[in-house]
Amino acid sequence: MSRKRPRSRPQMKSSPSGEGRTANEKQSGRSNVWVVIAAVAGPAVAIAALLFTPVSNLLSAWWESLPPQMVAKYDGKSPVTTKCVEDNEEWKTFRYSQPGAAINPAALMRVNGSESCQAAWVYVANSLDGTRVEKTIERMKENWVGGARYTTPDDLTIDPLVTIEGKETIGPNGQSYTDQVYAPGCVWVSLKLTDLTTDGVIWEIPRQEVCKP
């Protein structure tokens, strides 16, 4: 009798394309691919944005930041109209107290600066009615930047007080500014407060240097 040859069982071949993997394994593989793509694409996008930034824009920003351009833009301008006052910081404050005054200190002078504008100016709040406030700010000449000086010889204070919620305070008539100067470092300032009737000096701050803190 002839023997029957045993029938061979077909063998499962592994799929080189991964068709034999589970759904979770497939999802994990796809996630890893996206992580790699994101890691590579992020810096590439940033570099591409920098490379495609118009050179003219970069040159324009550099040019406008140079001291001569800053001088032309901010010297002799009001810190209010240029909006430099929006980020002002106090460099130094001088105070004058007067016995019997409705408000004390009766007057103050503050040297303010702006980081964004690289400029400085003098601000005065004065509660003394019938007075003249002569305030001055200067930038000394140095390197390629010339000197500048601004003063307010005809700044009169009339009816400076207002009442807010039953309390007297210094209103707009008692507040004033000098024009500003480009000043990334130091300025020279002075003040003379005189009586309009007698022309007598009430308060005086001698010319002195004030620097950015």
Image: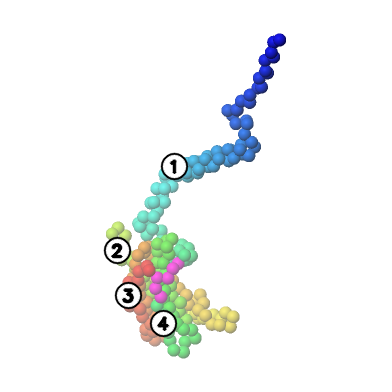
- 90 in magenta: yes
x 45%, y 43%: residue: 47
Reply above or below: 45 against 62: above
Q: How many C-alpha atoms fall within 10 Å of the one at disc 1: few (<14), some, or many (≥20)?
A: few
Regarding mark 4 in the picture, which secondary structure is present there?
strand
For discs 2 and 4, the disc positioned in front in the rendered view = 4
Regarding mark 2 in the picture, which secondary structure is present there?
loop
Residue marked by disc 1: 51
Instruction: Name the disc covering residue 96, or none.
Output: 4
For discs 1 and 4, the disc positioned in front in the rendered view = 1
For discs 1 and 3, the disc positioned in front in the rendered view = 1
Instruction: Name the disc covering residue 207, or none.
Output: 3
Main SS of the magenta segment?
strand
Q: Which of marks 2 and 1 is nearer the N terminus?
A: 1
Q: Which of marks 1 and 3 is nearer the N terminus?
A: 1
Q: Are marks 3 and 4 in contact (CB under 8 Å)?
A: no
> What's the CA distance linking mark 3 and mark 4?
16 Å
* Residue 35 lies in quadrant: top right
> What's the CA distance linking mark 2 and mark 1?
39 Å
Q: Earlier in the sequence, mark 2 or mark 3?
A: 2
Q: Give the residues in magenta.
A: 88-93
